[in-house]
Image (cartoon, rainbow, N blue to C red):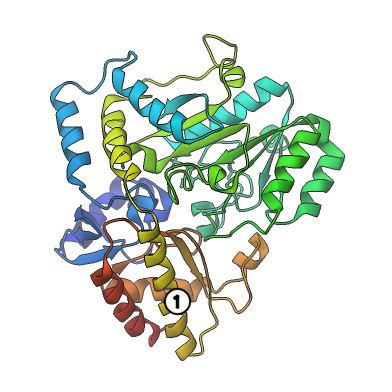
Amino acid sequence: MKGDDLFSEALKLFPSGVNSPVRFYRPVPVMFERGRGSRIYDVNGKEYIDYSLGFGPMILGHADPDVASAIKRQADNGILFGSITENEVRLGNIIKNHVKSIEKMRFTNSGTEATMHAIRLARGYTKRKYILKMEGGFHGAHDYALIKSGSGTMTFGVPSSNGVPEEITKTVLVGKYNDENSIESLFNEYGNDIAAVITEPILGNIGVINPELGFLEFLREITNKYNSLLIFDEVITGFRFAFSGYQDIINIKPDITTMGKIIGGGAPIGLFGSSSEIMDLISPSGNVYESGTFSGNPLSMAAGIAAMEKLQGMDYSRINNYTADLVKSLYDIFNDKNIDVNINHYGSMFQIFFNKNEVKTYDDAIKSDKDRFFKFFKKMLDHNVYLPPSQFETNFVSFAHGRDDLNKTIEAAKEAVSCI
Ligand code: PMP
C-alpha cells in the first residue's frame, strides 16, 4: 500500500515518523492526501468522515471555497512583509468586537506560543513567580506548560517531560480541575506569589471535561482575592460554541485570554489578549518581550478573516444538535451491548470514555479503558470514520457535517461495537 511505503520513509526522517506525537499510532497511521467538507481521503483513495478536523480548527470543514480563495489571493500578492498589514487590523477587530475581555491582543503562530507569552505577561504584570495550572490541562509544548499536562503527553505517558529543568517545574503549581479544595490549599500556601491560574475553561485534552457548576466562578473569585490573574486558554473553545469566547457564554471575564485554531481558518495561528493596561506591558511599549517573524502572517490573516466572516453568519445550534444526536445514538449502541461508557460533550465537542463512572476529573479520565478506546478507534477507521486517535483528545463536528454523515457514523459505530 502506498501509505505504508511512505510511512517507512517518514520513519527515517521524523521521530516515530510524525511531526507531532498524537499523529502516531500503531501499526501505521493513516496518511491523508486531501479533504473536502466533512470528508478526508488517504493516499490510497479511501474516504473517511472526519471528527478530528485537524485537532479542531476546521469548523467549516475542509477546503472551504471562501477560505481557499482568500489564501490563493494572498499568495498572489505576497506572503510575508514583516510589517503591520490591513488584514491584521481587520482580524483583530473581529476578535475584539466579539470577546469582551480583549481590548488589545498579539497574534502568534500557534497556541503554544500564545500561552507561553501569556504566562510571561502575567508574571511581568504581577511581578510574581508561580503559575497554577490544572492536572491534565494542556497549553502546548513549552517548558511552563509541560507539567502534569494532557493531550499527547498523557497518550504516551510523559505528562511531565524530560528536559524541563527542575527550577522551572518548581514554579508551576498543579491543582485539580473541578476540585475547589485542591486550588484553595495551593492559594493558602502560595497565594501571594501566584501570578496566574491558567486553565482551559472546558478541559479538552484529556477527553472533554465540563466545569462543575460554580468551579470557574470560584477560580475568578479566588484569583481576585489574591490579586492573581486568571488566564482562560480558549485555544480550543474560542469561537467553537458561539461567535465569541466560551467566557462570554458563561459570563466570566478572565484577565488574559489565549486563542488559536478556529480563528486562523486552519492556517497556523495563536493569539493572546487582555485589557489595554496589561497588554501595553508588551514590548516595545513595555518590558515584557514577545516577537515572531511569522506572527500576524498574511496567509493566516487572510484565511482567518475569510473563515471568521463566514462563521459569523452560522447557526451554531446546527453543529450542537448534530453532536447531541450523535452522542445519544452512541449511548444507545453501547447500551445495547452492555458496554460501560460515558460520553462527555458540550456544543460541538464530545469524547467517549469506556468507564462505568461519570468522568468529572483527571483521576476519573485516566481510569477509562484506553485499550478499548483504541480498539474502537481502529474499528471506526475500518468503517470509514476518523476519530482523533487518542482517548485524551476531543472529537469535533463541523458545519460541513450533515445528516448523511450522521447516519453513516451511526452505522459504522454499530459495526465497530461488535468487535471491541
Ligand atoms: N492550548 C490548548 C487548550 C490546546 O488544545 C492546544 C493544542 N491542542 C494548545 C494550547 C497548543 O496549541 P498549538 O498546537 O497551536 O501550539
Please give the name of the residue rendered at 36% of the width and 47% of the height, measured from the top-left corner.
Answer: 57
Quarter of the rendering occupied by the N terminus: bottom left
Residue at left offset 64%, top offset 35%? 165
Q: Quadrant of the C terminus?
A: bottom left
Q: Is residue 174 visible?
A: no
The residue nearer to you, when weighing 314 against 134, is 314
Residue 121 shows in this picture: yes
Instruction: Give the residue drawn at x 60%, y 65%.
Output: 365
Can you give x and y, in whole percent of width and height, for residue 347 in the image? 46, 59
- Compared with 254, 38 (above or below) is below
State which quadrant residue 414 falls in: bottom left
Picture quarter containing residue 212?
Answer: bottom right
Instruction: Label 1: state its secondary structure.
Output: helix
Horizontal side of 402 relative to 347 (left or right) equals: left
Q: Nearer the viewer, residue 166 or 331?
A: 331
Q: Is 388 or 146 nearer to us in this picture?
A: 388
Above or below, 216 against 297 in this view is below
Q: Answer with left or right where residue 132 lies relative to residue 118.
A: right
Q: Which residue is mark 1?
A: 328
**Image coordinates for residue 210, horizontal then vertical, percent:** 59, 59
